[in-house]
Amino acid sequence: MATTPLALEVRGLRKSYGKLDVLRGVDFDVAAGSIFALLGSNGAGKTTVVRILSTLLKPDSGTAGVHGFDVLAQPEKVRESISLTGQFAAVDQILTGRENLIMVARLRQVREPGKVADDLLERFGLTDAGGRRVGTYSGGMRRRLDIAMSLIGDPPVIFLDEPTTGLDPEARIEVWQEIQSLAGKGTTILLTTQYLDEAEKLADRIAILHEGTIIVSGTLADLRKLLPPAKTELVERQPTLEEIFLSIVGKGAATPEGAQR
Amino acid sequence: MSAHVVGNTNVMLGRSIRHVTRSMDTIITVTIMPIAFMLLFRYVFGGAIQTGTANYTNYLMPGILLIAIASGISYTGYRLYNDLQSGIFERFHSMPIARSAVLWGHVLTSVVSNAISAVVIIGVGLIMGFRTSAGILAWLAVAGILLLFTLALTWVAMIAGLAASSPDGATAFSYPLVFLPFISSAFVPTATMPGPVKAFAENQPVTSIVNAVRALFDGQPAGHDIWIATGWCVGILVLAYALAMRVYRRKIS
């Protein structure tokens, strides 16, 4: 871990709105190619961190490096290195899915925007819906399109701010699979979530943001050590409601990753 | 860098033009009210209004066009507000693009959609008897004044779109603007108005713009009205632009 280059380097980040201290000294590192989960309740400051890292907001003090670039000194370099998928699927509802992708590809000056769009539609199972206005899409489709838009131009760092909030279980699992496959290809992912199971399933390292500071951070194994060692008890394992739901609607078998809890 | 700005702005323009063409109802809403006023004044009130001109449709036309523009720009504020609300504004700002393209896309869209409305209204006006002896130069001058007026009000709309906290807030600013032509020389000569009203009417921007455009359409010399009109438009444009940029910078820092 010590020799892996850092994709994100955050030191002493502070931000307040008037008297409200949202961030009170946030520090963390994320190794290149890993999935890092920032866990916290609503209002813990997760989105503020993401907004600072994506150059949408300036911190009051502290530094943040993204892919080797400082967010304050080299914001344009940072923006070339990242993609942001915000809390609410930021897609154009009046355009079609394909037009949304082409728009982003043209803005990022990617070659052959049409082909890039078609490839992504295919990869995200949106080929049939590609010619329809996004206003007619379901929440899950919108989110998939949103993530697809973030992948254009292959940015090395992707921020996913609560990517599965408001999704149904199937859509959630699809998003999870996509995140894992991205990290498998070397993309660094910073994920914020309020779902503990999401962090547990996806993240290489987890940090818990609480009242504006990171109170613990480490791998899942590190975090487990914070509690007394597990005792062996015999418990009859009941299927979770999620497993029942997925097996009834018939998607469970196709998604062993999500259903094996 | 500037090629970057042009390229990005072009993509943004293409995007919001689609918003305009896919919601043709906005063009209809924008043009229907001015057309209704045109019908009302021409065929209901017009007979009782003494303007000293033979063709009242000609007299009306400049004011009707200004009403159309004033109501058209409210959609500009609304579209910008929607972008901010939906998060797509932030998505664009987190991308490696010229950030100014996001606003300029909206500004150019406003110009294009208002131009469409103006053409529709002039078309209806022609059916109702609007006649002009304007030559190419005069037409260009009219287009220039209307363009300046559109740009000035568009930047006012940008302030509203950026600062509003509700969709109503993003559009309501245009109501007083739509009303301004009524207290001007757009429908009746200002000479008939009582003192204070007359003083207001003669010294607000719409009167000079209306007088200048009317003179140009009639093939008359527009005199100093055209310079007062230009002065008003440029002044409002500069002020609104400066204010909008201030609100914008506060928004993105």
Image (cartoon, coloured by chain):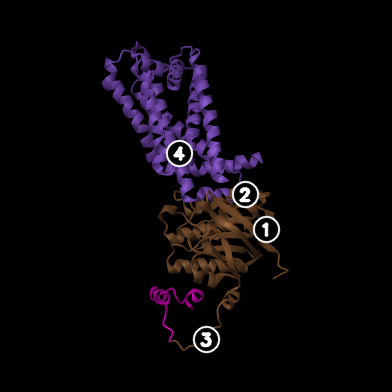
Which chain does the numbered disc 2 sit on? B
Same-subunit check for callouts 3 and 1: yes
> Label 2 vs label 4: CA separation?
25 Å
Question: How many labels were placed on the picture?
Answer: 4
Give the foreground label among 3 and 2: 3
**How many neighbours does mark 1 have within 10 angstroms: few (below 14), some (14-19), or many (20 or more)?**
many
Span shown in magenta: A236-261
Q: Secondary structure at mark 1?
A: loop
Residue A261 place in picture, x, y as percent: 48, 78
Which color was chain A given?
A: brown
Residue A126 place in picture, x, y as percent: 48, 60
In this view, the mark in front (2 or 1): 1
Image disc number at residue B77 = 4
Q: CA distance from mark 2 to mark 1?
A: 14 Å
Residue denoted by label 2: B96
Left or right, A243 with respect to B102, comes to left
**Which mark is in front, 2 or 4?**
4
Amino acid carrying mark 1 in the image: His
SS class of the residue under badge 2?
Answer: loop
- The reply, left or right, for residue A3 in relation to residue A163 is right
The local secondary structure at tag 3 comes to: loop
Q: Disc 1 designates what residue?
A: A67
For marks 2 and 4, the one nearer the N-term is 4
Q: Quadrant of the N terminus of chain A?
A: bottom right
Q: Mark 2 and mark 3 in contact (Cβ < 8 Å)?
A: no
Confirm whether circles 4 and 1 share one chain. no
Chain letter of disc 3 in the image = A
